[in-house]
Amino acid sequence: MSGVVIKTGLIGHPVGHSKSPLIHEYWIKQHNLSASYDLYDCAPENLEGTVHRMRAEHLRGFNVTIPHKQSVMALCDTLDETARAVGAVNTVRIDESGMHGMNTDVFGFLENLRRCTRDIDYTNAPAVILGAGGAARAAVYGLLKSGVPSVTLVNRSLDKAESLAADMAAYGAVKITPWEKRDRALAGASLLVNTTSLGMLGQPPLDLSLEHLPEAAAVYDIVYTPLMTDLLQRAHDRGHKTITGIGMLLHQARPAFQAWFGVMPDIDEALERLVLS
Ligand code: ATR
């Protein structure tokens, strides 16, 4: 090895609890690369200065997390189609032509779904999405692009659902159902996705009855602490196919690693165990 260390990292606020270093450092070692993945904790008002410093340190690229996923877009020289459509960048690649913003959350969301539903056609009926934040944006865009006939958005704040639906109108049909009518919204769905923080450790529970959800529907929770959320446990007990959130976290990291190091890494059981430990 030449002794040159390829630098990458994560910018966010806070970043201390992120699982991303575990994932990328695991692959760096597995592929025998001389590289680092460092944390850059920076408040919103310091974003530009910190990105400037990262470029001065010759980073090959970096991940972006809360609260910078939208604001970093203005600092990018190019944006890929997904980042533009979703309105968020979670991965940046830097080369001599500048900073290139990408969104790999959509890939992570869909790849996890595809791998877990090989025997189910989730594109034959509407999908119901709970939530209208950043994760919901990735989910709605990904599902519409993969041929789901329509998406029903159910969110506590109607205005956020309306704004998401308007942004996604170019990609397919998005309907809105008020939060109070969430139980009935499940009738006829092929897929239910929770993108809210409800059910996460330390957050309120998700109060949702599954009685109207068709038997063949799959249930996907992007919350992964705990891995088997109350929603997934109840869905499993009713015989639904369930999809945990850890796969989304792992799969979104793969195209980022590829963008920086030119290798598409794989997920194995040891990595899964490491991230869940
Ligand atoms: P992310 O970007 O990770 O998706 P977010 O933008 O904070 O996170 O979105 C969190 C989602 O959980 C939102 O849809 C939020 O609903 P609001 O748009 O009404 O804020 C939803 N959420 C959080 N706490 C909730 C609660 N107690 N009841 C219902 N929805 C809740």
Image: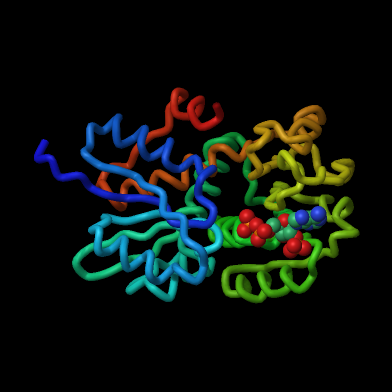
Q: Residue 89, percent across and down?
A: 46, 63
Instruction: Tell me, yes or no, if residue 261 can be seen here.
Output: yes
Rendered-image quarter of ligand 1 = bottom right
Instruction: Tell me, yes or no, if residue 140 can be seen here.
Output: no
Q: Residue 77, percent across and down?
A: 33, 74
* Residue in view at x 69 percent, y 48 percent: 193
* Residue in view at x 47 percent, y 47 percent: 252
Of residues 196 and 57, the one drawn nearer to the viewer in this rendering: 57
- Tell me if 209 is positioned left or right of 199 in this view: right
Q: Residue 234, percent across and down?
A: 81, 33
Q: Is residue 241 above or below residue 56?
A: above
Of residues 124 and 57, the one drawn nearer to the viewer in this rendering: 57
- Tell me if 220 is positioned left or right of 184 in this view: left
* Residue in view at x 32 percent, y 68 percent: 52
Q: Is residue 65 above or below residue 157?
A: above
* Residue in view at x 30 percent, y 36 percent: 28
- Tell me if 200 is positioned left or right of 30 in this view: right
Of residues 216 and 273, the one drawn nearer to the viewer in this rendering: 273
Q: Quadrant of the C terminus?
A: top right
Q: Residue 219, percent across and down?
A: 71, 41
Residue 37 sits in quarter: top left
Q: Is residue 39 above or below residue 31?
A: below
- Tell me if 244 is positioned left or right of 32 in this view: right
Q: Quadrant of the N terminus?
A: top left
